[in-house]
Image: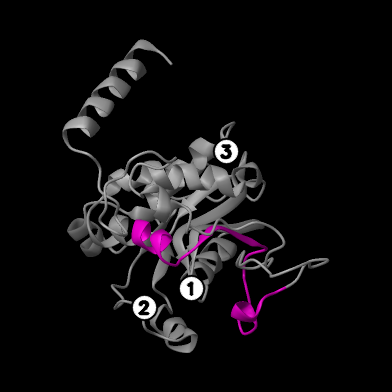
């Protein structure tokens, strides 16, 4: 650790002593454990996804599985992308981390998300790729203050290392209503023509592109973005999400 890193760690430790961090899931004090915003008890409840898993969305299979398989979540999805991976299941404390980032203006939880990204082992699959965050509509990004998918893409890129980089060739042109409680058919209808290529954006057919989003639910948003990139010339196209649920 360099001098600036040591100083930052000192002040962070001092801050924790004066103002102990609070668990974003249960509200208790965070004392010990490997995460800073989940207490050790809640940390143990986070389900990190391990193989075998669905080739489309990354949802894990129970027990043993052979070959490439598709789970029931993706039975009706016709993916424009090749394969997908995810880091955790979106339940309990894992959901609390995503909601803190997405709805409660808490970008500081990204340090815990970065730890879980590394624990899930997806970073090796991203090395050398161009990571493309799913864009927010400008109105929503102004209200939130950031695009959570862009922040997560930066953490994925840092974990992957090498020549992995983040690019933003996509824009959201339709301010769609929230998709949270909608089924796949309604989501697909809402997202028709919702995304477009940015003016001047260039897609290199020789590059591997990986779309990044916070959550894989039905895959409709990622598929809509993938269709735009595919039409623009992206031949090698995958997706990765932090959570699934």
At x 26%, y 28%, the residue is: 12
Report helix, strand or loop for mark 3: helix
Which residue carries the number 2 mark?
Answer: 179
User: Which of pointers 1 and 2 lies earlier in the amino acid sequence?
Assistant: 2
User: For residue 72: magenta?
Assistant: yes
Residue 223 in percent (x, y) is at 54, 71
Q: Is residue 132 visible?
A: yes
Report helix, strand or loop for mark 1: loop
Which residue carries the number 3 mark?
Answer: 160
User: Which of pointers 3 and 2 lies earlier in the amino acid sequence?
Assistant: 3
Q: Residues within 10 Å of mark 1 (few under 14, many from 20)?
A: many
Disc on res. 217: 1
At x 62%, y 73%, the residue is: 79
Spatial CA distance of label 3 from label 2 is 30 Å
Of 49 and 159, which appears nearest the observer? 49
Q: Residues within 10 Å of mark 3 (few under 14, many from 20)?
A: many
CB-based contact (under 8 Å), mark 3 and mark 2: no
**Can you say whether 80 is above or below 143 in the image?**
below
Spatial CA distance of label 3 from label 1 is 24 Å
Disc on res. 72: none
Of 134 and 66, which appears nearest the observer? 66
In the rendered structure, the answer to whether residue 55 lies left or right of residue 66 reads left
At x 48%, y 88%, the residue is: 185
Of 221 and 182, which appears nearest the observer? 182
**Can you say whether 47 is above or below 10 in the image?**
below
CB-based contact (under 8 Å), mark 1 and mark 2: yes
Spatial CA distance of label 1 from label 2 is 10 Å
CB-based contact (under 8 Å), mark 3 and mark 1: no
**In the image, which residues are magenta?**
70-98
**Can you say whether 80 is above or below 134 in the image?**
below
At x 29%, y 16%, the residue is: 7
| Image quadrant occupied by the N terminus | top left
């Amino acid at each position: 650790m360099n001098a600036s890193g040591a100083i930052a760690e000192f002040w962070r430790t001092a801050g924790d002593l004066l103002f102990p961090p609070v668990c974003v899931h249960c509200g208790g004090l965070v004392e010990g454990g490997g995460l800073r915003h989940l207490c050790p008890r809640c940390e143990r409840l986070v389900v990190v996804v391990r193989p075998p898993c669905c080739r489309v969305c990354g949802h894990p299979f129970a027990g043993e599985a052979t070959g490439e398989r598709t789970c029931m979540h993706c039975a009706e999805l016709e993916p424009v992308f090749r394969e997908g991976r995810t880091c955790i299941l979106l339940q309990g404390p894992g959901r609390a981390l995503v909601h803190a980032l997405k709805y409660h203006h808490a970008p500081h939880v990204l340090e815990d998300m970065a730890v879980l990204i590394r624990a899930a082992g997806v970073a090796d699959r991203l090395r050398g790729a161009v990571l493309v965050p799913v864009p927010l509509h400008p109105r929503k990004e102004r209200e939130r203050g950031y695009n959570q998918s862009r922040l997560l893409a930066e953490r994925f890129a840092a974990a992957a290392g090498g020549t992995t980089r983040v690019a933003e060739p996509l824009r959201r042109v339709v301010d769609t209503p929230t998709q949270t409680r909608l089924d796949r058919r309604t989501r697909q209808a809402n997202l028709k023509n919702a995304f477009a290529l940015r003016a001047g954006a260039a897609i290199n057919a020789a590059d591997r592109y990986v779309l990044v989003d916070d959550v894989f639910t039905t895959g409709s948003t990622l598929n809509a973005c993938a269709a735009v990139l595919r039409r623009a010339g992206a031949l090698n196209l995958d997706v990765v999400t932090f959570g699934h649920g």
